[in-house]
Amino acid sequence: MCGITGAAWTAAAAPLDANVLTRMTTALAHRGPDDACYYHSAISPDRAARSIPELISLGKHPLAISRPGAALGHRRLSIIDLAGGHQPLSNEDGSVWIAFNGEIYNYRELQGPLEHQGHRFRTSSDTETIVHLYEQYGTDCVKHLRGMFAFAIWDERQKQLFLARDRLGKKPFIYRLEHDRLLFASELKAILQVPGVSRELDPVALNEYLTYQYVPHPHSILKGFCKLPPAHWGMYRKGNWEVQRYWAPAFVKPEAQATSVTEEQARDTLRSTLTEAVRLRMRSDVPLGAFLSGGIDSTIVVGLMQQLSERPVKSFSIGFPVQAFDERSFARLAAEHLKTEHHEQVVEPSALAILPKLIEQYDEPFADSSAIPTMYLSEMTRRHVTVALSGDGGDELFAGYERYRAVKLAERFDSLPRFAQKVISSPIWQSLPASTRQKSRRRRLKRLLSALSYPPERRYLKWVSIFDDARLPDLWSDEFHDRLRGAEPAAFLLEAYSECPSRDFTTRTTCADVLTYLPCDILNKVDIASMTYGLEVRCPLLDQEVVDLAAGMPLEWKMRGGKGKRILIETFADLLPPAIQNRGKMGFGVPLDHWFRGELSPMLKDVLLDPKSLGRGLFRPQAIEQLITEHVTSRWDHSYRLWALLVLELWQQKYLDQRV
């Protein structure tokens, strides 16, 4: 796990300044605290160096502006081949260079065939395997990789830069295409070190952020910056930029609709496939452990780790003083059942303490408040291990979210006679107040009823939106609203639905979440939070073979009796105590509603109602004041909307006003 950055340029552009490359790489030091190294084709086309002065001292040619070139910067978190895995790394003759972030779990299995084809390995690292795969297969090298990755390969002979991102989007990749130059990095803050780079807010991205609570790919919050989507590669050559998709989960394949195996056979295959995925992810030359919440997914992963280990697995969980947000009892139950070496910590989540770090690390506005406990958990875990396995992906792949039950229920609504639909979706139900005591259940009911009259895809978007299509237009100022003409935030989700047109709608919804919410929210949240503390997190449930297996399963294997993950629970019942098998879904959250009526109430008003904030011209002041008043007086629960607005304004102060 590392941080990568760099650039490629045409013959018409000046090479990237070596000192700028240093600043770009240093901005990613938290992702790779163990080492820093650089490659610059215009200074030393056949060597890499640990420092810019060392790189310049290797120079055989003056910086030239008459030839294409590239520069790569790398910050390393040492996991595999501690002594020999330094990057950027090249092939035998120094004509192909790579900067790589991630882990390739099947690298040992790939090395033998490559050696048979004549490739010579100088290290025992997974990184070198990618270099030789690229030499052998070109852009198809990505199809051989089983793992999480974002990498840049400079091909000196072809004078081209090849970028690629893993199938599910576990590792981030952002780039900026300029005239005669391409800049790239693991995180936005690295590219912002380049002098003259514009920092203009993108209205379309902002509209999407307040819809989804994140900025979806390929957009970035700043104009001119893009995210390479999951399962895509890009090629920059002679100033031309090409992007192609190389993989899609089996949801979208016609053969996924039918199965020639029984459910019992599918359980056997699931057991062996996930066990192998866990085994591969336990390869490490540094201490390794696992997140353990006591939920179904993390308990299964830890249980398989324990079966594959000769010693107790180190497991980690955090708890909160507020019982509604505390999973420690379930985590302890799982740890005792599996006999792990369990570590836990009680934290009092303080928004005032963690907000500055959260704003700085996430680069873009990111309004999923569960980033806060994820950062606390990552910090605690890193004190004991360098690598942790997690259960991410189980909810999306095996229909675990409670909202899928609502989707299933809404399908029944769609089959009712028209008059019955009108009664159930009548606006009279929306006038019910959402008091503090009843807010959770009644809020969900109102949200369900309010969207029933919508087409199914837009209904789901309305349920998961922070600001839906009814609220968002009223938020914008007239001037900013004019800048959004033609913008359609729903397009991102609707496009994902279109990739799985012929399955049942609940399965289509899980597919849409795998393509949108999972990479843009869940995986982004975990990557940034964990890498803030130099912790690598691996996700066995998101192994491509597990994903394709789950994607091809019929919904009735996953959902029965209104509950999801049935095939997971039945397959791994020996690893799951009965109390965990039957427990409800508990979000990994923080008490936002209480914070905004207590600890954060003064800050909320000071920040959002400050003349500087209102003077940005984005929102109608009356709309902001109304949201705050309705929440503080407990008339409505606007906690997630206010959190999104607060994060946005603090981000603007940090990244636009202070110029990080």
Image (cartoon, rainbow, N blue to C red):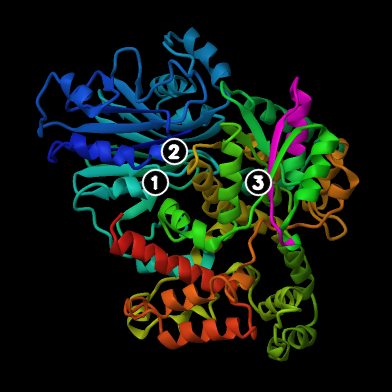
Residue at 28% x, 22% y is: 48
Judge left or right: residue 470 versus residue 572.
left
- Give residue 89's position: percent from left, percent from top: 36, 22
In the image, which is nearer the foreground, mark 2 or mark 3?
2
The secondary structure type at the circle numbered 2 is: helix
Residue at 47% x, 70% y is: 646
Are discs 2 and 1 less than 8 Å apart at CB?
A: yes
Residue under numbered circle 1: 187
Q: Real-space Cα distance between discs 2 and 1?
A: 10 Å
Residue under numbered circle 2: 31
Q: Real-space Cα distance between discs 2 and 3?
A: 23 Å
- Give residue 351's position: percent from left, percent from top: 54, 62
Q: Residues within 10 Å of mark 2 (few under 14, many from 20)?
A: many
Residue under numbered circle 3: 393
What span is colored magenta in the figure?
300-322
* Of residues 619 and 448, the one drawn nearer to the viewer in this rendering: 619
Residue 153 visible from this viewpoint = yes
Judge left or right: residue 300 versus residue 605.
right
